[in-house]
Image (tube, helix red, strand yellow):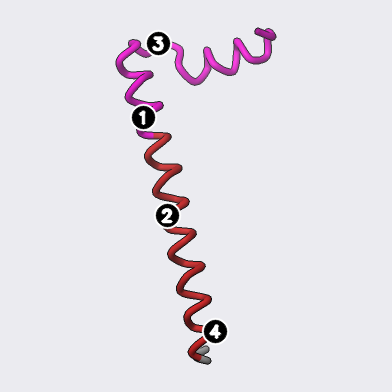
Amino acid sequence: MSPATFYKLKAKYGGMELSDAKRLKQLEDENAKLKRLLADTMLDNVVLKDLLGKP
């Protein structure tokens, strides 16, 4: 591990308990999944509006 990576991880997770770090990772993963779902839904809406000819 490079020193830069070490200090980046230390800044992000420093002072956290292991369970807190695991929960943070779970929440970040869930957030990324929800963002992808939202982007897909918004894209579907744009496509449907284009097909229906509505502005």
Classify residue 37 by image quadrant: bottom left
Q: Which residue is mark 4?
A: 50
Q: Which residue is mark 1?
A: 26
Spatial CA distance of label 2 from label 4 is 20 Å
In primary-sequence order, the first of circles 2 and 3 is: 3
Q: Which residue is mark 3?
A: 15
Spatial CA distance of label 3 from label 4 is 50 Å
In primary-sequence order, the first of circles 4 and 1 is: 1
Spatial CA distance of label 4 from label 1 is 36 Å
**In the rendered view, does 53 fall on the left or right side of 28?**
right
Q: Amino acid at mark 3?
A: Gly
Point 42% across, 45% down: residue:
33
Mark 4 closeness class: few <14, some 14–19, many ≥20 residues within 10 Å: few
For marks 4 and 1, give the one nearer the viewer.
Answer: 4
The region drawn magenta spans 1-27
Q: Tag 2's secondary structure?
A: helix
**Callouts 2 and 4 close, C-beta under 8 Å:** no
